Amino acid sequence: MAENIRVSRDGVILTISIARADAGNRLTNEMAGALADALDAAGDSRVILLRALGPDFCLGRDIEPPAPGAGVRALDVLRDDAGPIIALYAALARRNQPIVGLVQGKAWGIGLVLAAMCDLSFAAQGSSFRLRELERGIPPCIAMAPLLHRLPGKALAHLVYTAGEMDAAWALANGVVSEIADGAALERRAREAAERIVSFPPEAVDAVKQFMAHAPRSDESKAVLYGASLLANVLGSR
């Protein structure tokens, strides 16, 4: 595992930390792979805490777009640029336990996406959120994909087309994070949430995780039927 991805355990609560503070916790392809591996190895935990060390959560990816005229093939871009992030998204989607994010400082690019993909995300006062890829001539469509059903359409468009730096209040209002905490209380609030989740029956938590993963993409009638089947399975197994 890359040395910049650290894993620790406190009972059934697993903590995964991005530890590259001197570079703003920018993700290299190796780090993205190590983060995916850490998520896949978390199968026997009940809750995952995803955090970063240092003043910023993550300033994005540590990869430069090819220069004009470089002759890079589309297949190379798919392999080297898109591939590691697609694999990371898949690892996040495979997790059947809740993931709680702790966000401080800048959550830009993939940092913003990770914050949004966590089941719960606690953001420190003063944190900021940004997708600035258009400034670099990059269409941030890979970053946008997990945000399509998590953010309102106009909010996502504003985020991308302005490349602006949004504050924690904006992130809360638009579903990127679930709570804003005073900086000193960030860790405590996230830990309290994790311990609260652990106190619930695991089969009920698993059912909620499945429902939240799939039902939002369904129309209301299908979501109701899916929720009813999950409820029946949980109660019928007691």
Image (spheres, grey):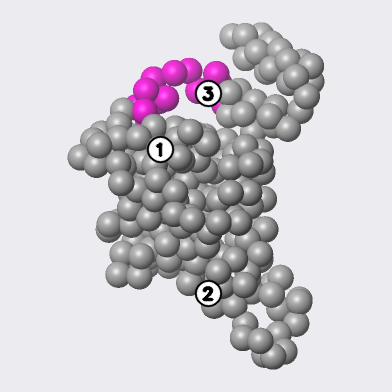
Please say whether residue 109 is visible from this viewpoint: yes
Residue name at image x 69 percent, y 75 percent: 77
Indicate which disc residue 205 carries: 3
How far is disc 1 from disc 3 in space, using C-alphas?
28 Å
Q: Nearer the viewer, residue 15 or 109?
A: 109
- Which quadrant would residue 6 be assigned to in this image? bottom left
Residue designated by label 2: 63
| Amino acid, disc 1 | Ala
Q: Earlier in the sequence, mark 1 or mark 3?
A: 1
Crowd around label 3: few <14 · some 14–19 · many ≥20 (10 Å): some
Q: Which residues are magenta?
A: 193-206
Crowd around label 1: few <14 · some 14–19 · many ≥20 (10 Å): some
| Amino acid, disc 2 | Ile
Q: Quadrant of the N terminus?
A: bottom left
Residue 221 counted in the magenta span: no
Indicate which disc residue 169 carries: 1
Q: Earlier in the sequence, mark 1 or mark 2?
A: 2
Indicate which disc residue 149 carries: none
Give the mark count. Answer: 3
Tell me where residue 224 appears, x and y as whole percent. 73, 15
How far is disc 3 from disc 2 in space, using C-alphas?
37 Å
Q: Are marks 1 and 3 in contact (CB under 8 Å)?
A: no
| Amino acid, disc 3 | Val
Q: Are marks 1 and 2 in contact (CB under 8 Å)?
A: no
Q: Nearer the viewer, residue 182 or 9?
A: 182
